[in-house]
Image (tube, grey):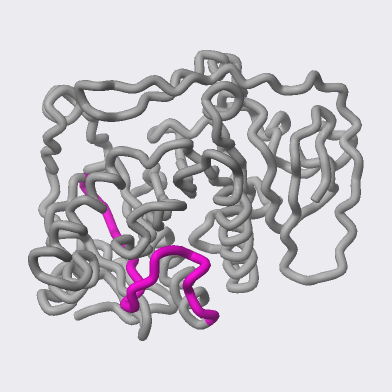
Amino acid sequence: MGRLADGREIIYFDDVPGLDRSVPDPRSLPRPEPRSEVRYDPVLDDWVVIAAHRQIRTHLPTREECPLCPSRGGGTGEIPAADYHVVAFENRFPSLGGPAGGRCEVVCFTSDHHARFGALPAARLDTVMRAWTDRTRALSALPGVEYVFIFENQGAGIGATLQHPHGQIYAYPFVPATLARALESAERFRRREGGCLFCSMVAAEERAAVRVVAETERMIAFVPEAARWPFEVHVYPRRHVPDLEALDERERVELMMLYAEVLDRFDRLFDPRPPYVAHVVQAPVRRSREQAHLSLRVFTSQRAEDKLKFLAASESAAGAFINDVLPEDAARRLRDLGGTGARPRV
C-alpha cells in the first residue's frame, strides 16, 4: 500500500508476487476535502447522497489524457507506476466521504486502455477477485460503513466518464433501499416457507431452463423471469454464501470465469459494443447477513442495435419498469452467442 501526492491510499494487486510498485507520485495536489452529504427522504424511507463537488470531475478525456493509464513517458495520471496488473485507490472526486461518511475507491482491471473485462485471462480474473475481496474486507472494517458495493459502468451510453477498463467500490454509511427491500422479502420468505428466497429462485430457474444462459458445476447464469432491463443476467453460486469472502477457491474460479463469459456475450450483442452496468450483490456489513445470497449481475440499457431504453415516466416517476424485450428471448439470444468456458443450457 502506498500514498498518492494528496494523501489518498493506493494498493497494487499483481498476478505474480515480487513486483516493485514503490513509485512516488510526482504531482503536486491539494488534499481532498469531500463535501458530500447524506440526506434522508422520509416519504420513501430512503437516503440520497448530495455530491455537488463532483461536477468538476474528469469527463471523457482523450486516450492521451486518460488518468487511469500507467505513468509512462512522463505521464502524470492517478497511477504512478509505469505498469500494473490491478490497482485500487481512493477516488479523487468521491461521492462519499467527509460529512457524508463512507468511502469511494476506483479499481483498475488492467493497464491496457483498450482491454475488455470479458477477455481478461484467468490469472487476471483471479487477481481482480482478490482485490474485490480484500477491499470488501478492509472497507467493511471502517467505522460507520454499512454496505460495500462493487460495480462497473462501461460505456458512455450508460454514464461512464472514463473509458479505461475499471470499476468502483462505494462503502455506504447506509444499506441502499433496493438491497434493504430484497432482504426484507427474503426474511418474509424465510418465515413463511423456510429456507432462502434466492436459493429457491435459482432452483426454479434451473428447472425452467428456458432463461438459463450458461452454467458451471458450482455457478449458474440466467435472465430473471421479471427482468427489468432489455438484457439482464444474474450469476449465482448454487451454494448459499453471503459474500465474496465466503467462497471457496474453486467457487471463486468458476464465478469469475462465468461472469467474464457473460460480459463477453454482452460485448457481442451489438456492434458497436453496448454499454452495461455490472455489480456485486453481497451481504450488508452488520444486518441480515443470513438472508443475503451473493450474486453478480449485469444489464444493458440497449434494447436494439440502434435503440437505448430510457428511464422515462413509468420508470423514473412511478418506479414501474417496462421491459421491451421478452426475458426468454434475451436468454436465447445470449445463449446463441456461445462462450468459451461455461456450459450453455440447451
Q: Is residue 86 left or right of residue 46?
A: right
| Front residue (pair 145, 150) | 145
Which residue is painted at 57% across and 61% down in the image? 133
Is residue 247 depicted above or below 234 in this figure? below
Residue 258 lies in the magenta-colored region: no
Q: Is residue 201 above or below residue 48?
A: below
- Whether residue 39 sits left or right of residue 223 in the image: it is right
Q: Is residue 164 left or right of residue 263?
A: right
Q: Quadrant of residue 198?
A: bottom left
In the image, the segment drawn in magenta is 229-249
Number of marks in the rendered image: 0
- For the C terminus, the image quarter is bottom left
Residue at 72% from the left image edge and 32% from the top image edge: 64
- Is 241 a magenta residue? yes
Q: Residue furthest bottom?
A: 217
Does residue 314 appear anywhere in the picture?
yes
Q: Position of residue 254 (x, y in %)?
A: 46, 77
Relative placement, left or right, of 86 versus 256 is: right
Q: Taking the image as drawn, is residue 267 in sight?
A: no
Most foreground residue, 47 or 66: 47
Q: Position of residue 152 (x, y in %)?
A: 48, 46
Q: What residue is at 87 percent from the left and 22 percent from the top?
A: 28
Q: Nearer the viewer, residue 252 or 283?
A: 283
In the rendered image, residue 255, in percent from the top left (x then y), is placed at: 44, 71
Above or below: residue 332 compared with residue 60: below
Q: Residue at x 39, y 35 (%)?
A: 158
